[in-house]
Image (spheres, grey):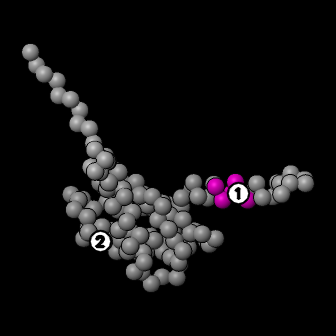
């Protein structure tokens, strides 16, 4: 008779396990954000890296960013210009088989929420706060 193995429970002192891609996404987000602080480019002021989505094969990664109250197109151009340096930082700091090729796009969630807030402010009911 074969005994089934019971699933191992994680205790309060043991960190929760993450899928590999989620760990790689977070690691790349931290590396890119840290490297942006070292760049001396005015177009990258107030830029926040909100999310990085790395393909499971580590060939490509999409970096989502936000720039509060400023032109995101200029920030996107600056990020593309500094792409090689950002990829080199990932290659140096992360122990990955491959270094993903980075592409950049504004974070649509932040953009949509700002638009919704603006619409709500413009269309307050009469006599409301």
In front of the other: 14 or 25? 14
Which image quadrant for residue 124? bottom right
Give the residue at mark 1: 117
The spot of residue 115 in percent (x, y) is 69, 57
Relative horizontal placement of residue 79, taking residue 125 as reference (left or right): left
Give the residue at mark 2: 88
The spot of residue 75 in percent (x, y) is 53, 72
The spot of residue 94 in percent (x, y) is 26, 64
Q: Quadrant of the N terminus?
A: top left
In front of the other: 11 or 49? 11
Residue 117 drawn in magenta: yes
Q: CA distance from mark 1 to mark 2?
A: 38 Å
Res 101 seen here: no
Residue placed furthest toward the bottom: 40
Which badge, 1 or 2, comes first in the chain's sequence?
2
Magenta segment boundaries in residue numbering: 113-118
- Mark 2, secondary structure of its residue: helix
Q: Relative to 6, is 10 above or below? A: below
């Amino acid at each position: 008779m074969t005994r089934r193995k019971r699933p191992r429970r994680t205790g309060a002192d043991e960190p929760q396990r993450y899928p590999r891609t989620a760990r790689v996404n977070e690691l790349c987000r931290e590396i890119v954000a840290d490297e942006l602080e070292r760049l001396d480019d005015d177009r990258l002021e107030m830029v926040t890296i909100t999310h990085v989505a790395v393909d499971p094969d580590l060939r490509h990664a999409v970096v989502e960013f936000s720039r509060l109250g400023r032109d995101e197109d200029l920030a996107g151009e600056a990020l593309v210009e500094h792409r090689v340096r950002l990829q080199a930082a990932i290659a140096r700091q992360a122990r990955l088989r491959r270094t993903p090729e980075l592409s950049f796009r504004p974070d649509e969630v932040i953009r949509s929420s700002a638009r919704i807030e603006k619409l709500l402010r413009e269309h307050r009911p009469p006599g409301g706060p």
